[in-house]
Amino acid sequence: MISDRNIRTALERFRFAIPASGNSTGTALEVVLDATMSMTTGDGSKESLARELSMFLLQLGEPSGIRTSLTVSKGGGRDRVIPASDVARLPFVAFDAVEPFSSAGSELAHGAAAPTYRVVVSDLLIPADFETLVARFARHVAQLWIIQILAAADRDPEAGGRMLLRDLETDETVEVTLDEASIEGYRSRLNQLCDRIKSACQATGATLVTVLAEVDLNELCDQYLVPAGLIARTTA
């Protein structure tokens, strides 16, 4: 569930750390929000934190003199752009995309139309060429931040014997045995995937922030986004 109180508190406590431009076009920051069904897995905390973070960043632009916008990434020509003035629409945007997030970024503005800065919010739990994907997001922007949000079940699934799993995006099913050995294998593959994401970000100069969805918005800001250089504290 989205907490308006968390968002209001964060807006009082933090500001953008990035400089506002003095030129005629100004400074623009674009948030790219992964709206695939993968973001709805777990207990709902991953989806809620992603929405709260996106709403917070959208509203943080006005007091900082920075134009903000949000691209809801669904792929297949279904991307939606939400300006800061329409932030109230975001809680009602469905996370129902089945197009893999690995194809995201192809519809984003580039060249002279590109924003100054870009923030990508996703779990990134996808088979992808991450160097290509991150480079696509980083093209023509001064700085890119990748915010990877993982649910507790993404990091530490519980053993549960034999069960039938369904892929929310492809509707494919597979029968698996969730014993300790299979879970250890999953954790190993997840660590390898995260290492690939980290290497891709290092190769493009992007800043990677990986956080568990159980943290609240203000903790995310204070302990992760301030050190990442995206925002700064306005109060002690």
Image (cartoon, rainbow, N blue to C red):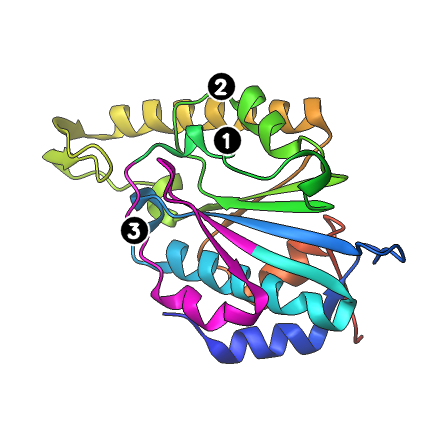
Asked if residue 108 is among those painted magenta in the image, a careful observer would answer no
The three-letter amino acid code for the residue at tag 1 is Ser
Q: Nearer the viewer, residue 103 or 5?
A: 103
Q: Which mark is residue 42?
A: 3
The three-letter amino acid code for the residue at tag 3 is Gly
| Percent x, y of residue 94 | 31, 57
C-alpha span from label 1 to label 2:
14 Å
Q: Tell us which disc is closer to us: 1 or 2.
A: 1
Give the answer, above or below, for where 172 lies relative to 47. above
The three-letter amino acid code for the residue at tag 2 is Asp
Looking at the image, residue 110 sits to the left or right of residue 151; the answer is: right
User: Which residue is labeled 2 in the image?
Assistant: 129
Callout 2 crowding tier (Cα within 10 Å): few <14, some 14–19, many ≥20: few
Asked if residue 96 is among those painted magenta in the image, a careful observer would answer yes
| Percent x, y of residue 236 | 80, 75
Q: Residue at x 69, y 46 (%)?
A: 115
Q: Residue at x 32, y 42 (%)?
A: 38
User: Which residue is labeled 1 in the image?
Assistant: 106
User: Which of the marked residues, 3 or 1, is nearer the chain's N terminus?
Assistant: 3
Q: Tell us which disc is closer to us: 3 or 1.
A: 1
| Percent x, y of residue 159 | 22, 38
**Under tag 3, what secondary structure?**
loop
Give the answer, above or below, for where 193 lies relative to 62. above
Asked if marks 1 and 2 touch (Cβ < 8 Å), the reply is no
| Bounds of the magenta segment | 70-98
Number of numbered discs on residues? 3
Give the answer, above or below, for where 157 lies relative to 192. below
